[in-house]
Amino acid sequence: LPISVQFDFATGIFTPFIDVTERRMSDLAPMFYDQDAVQSILASGNRTIYEIRYHPFITSSSDMGLGVTRIFPGKVGDEYHMTKGHFHERLDQPEIYFCVRGEGYLLLETRDGDFRTEPWQPGTITHIPPQWAHRVVNTGADTLVFVASYHISAGHDYEPILARGFSQVVVERGGVPQLVPNPRRT
Ligand code: M6P
Ligand code: ZN
């Protein structure tokens, strides 16, 4: 049977959802380049960087998943709050991301090191091709909200991101967001 959920543009929350995952500073710790900044944030608390609400639309004939992620504003050192980022385990699986609120960047990278950035604002919809890792960065003062639609069999592969990160990081320099080479790779 068809399933509908109701999305609230003001809060970035849809209901009913099946699951909610909070990603805190401790979960993201290895992803940020400035490890001194990570440790000093952890020493005074373990703040939530982003949270994801899921609805796996599992019916007899479909198994698409819906995820809505809210990335709260902030920085770790000078690096903006962001998702962990992942490849799909399945090599044939794409994804659609839809920015509904906030501003920032979608970072995309292949295993061969082909790197792209998509500037994001409300209304930007990006098709993520198979075999491109994807990470969202919130460079604004507001919460960034994006909707994701994917096949629930796609799977998440975080390992290459944990090991090396993306080619570039998004940092605040002179009061504005800038993309610079990832210090972890130099
Ligand atoms: C979107 C989807 C999810 C993903 C989430 C957070 O909702 O792509 O599959 O889990 O964003 O991204 P990450 O898993 O990289 O932290
Ligand atoms: Zn994905």
Image: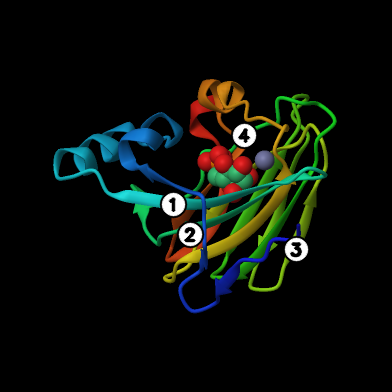
Quarter of the figure with residue 130: top right
> Label 3: how many residues lie within 10 Å, few (<14), some (14-19) or many (20+)?
some
> Label 1: how many residues lie within 10 Å, few (<14), some (14-19) or many (20+)?
some
Quarter of the figure with residue 174: bottom left
Tally the marks. 4
Please name the residue shown 45% across and 67% down the image: 143
Q: Nearer the viewer, residue 23 or 32?
A: 23
Please name the residue shown 53% across and 20% down the image: 163
Residue 8: % across, % down = 53, 75
Query: Is label 1 in contact with label 2 (beta carbons under 8 Å)?
Result: yes
Asked if residue 48 lies left or right of residue 160, the reply is: left
Q: CA distance from mark 1 to mark 2?
A: 5 Å
| Disc number for residue 86 | 4
Residue 125: % across, % down = 75, 63
Mark 3 vs 4, N-terminal side: 4
Q: CA distance from mark 3 to mark 2?
A: 16 Å
Q: Nearer the viewer, residue 69 or 71?
A: 69
Mark 1 vs 2, N-terminal side: 1
Residue 75: % across, % down = 37, 53
Eyeballing the image, is 183 above or below 68? above
Foreground disc of the pair 4, 1 = 1
Mark 4 C-beta to ligand 1 under 8 Å: yes
Q: What residue did someone put label 2 on?
A: 70
Q: What residue did someone put label 3 on?
A: 125
Query: Is label 2 in contact with label 4 (beta carbons under 8 Å)?
Result: no
Foreground disc of the pair 3, 1 = 1
> Looking at the figure, which quarter contains the N terminus?
bottom right
Query: Is label 3 in contact with label 4 (beta carbons under 8 Å)?
Result: no
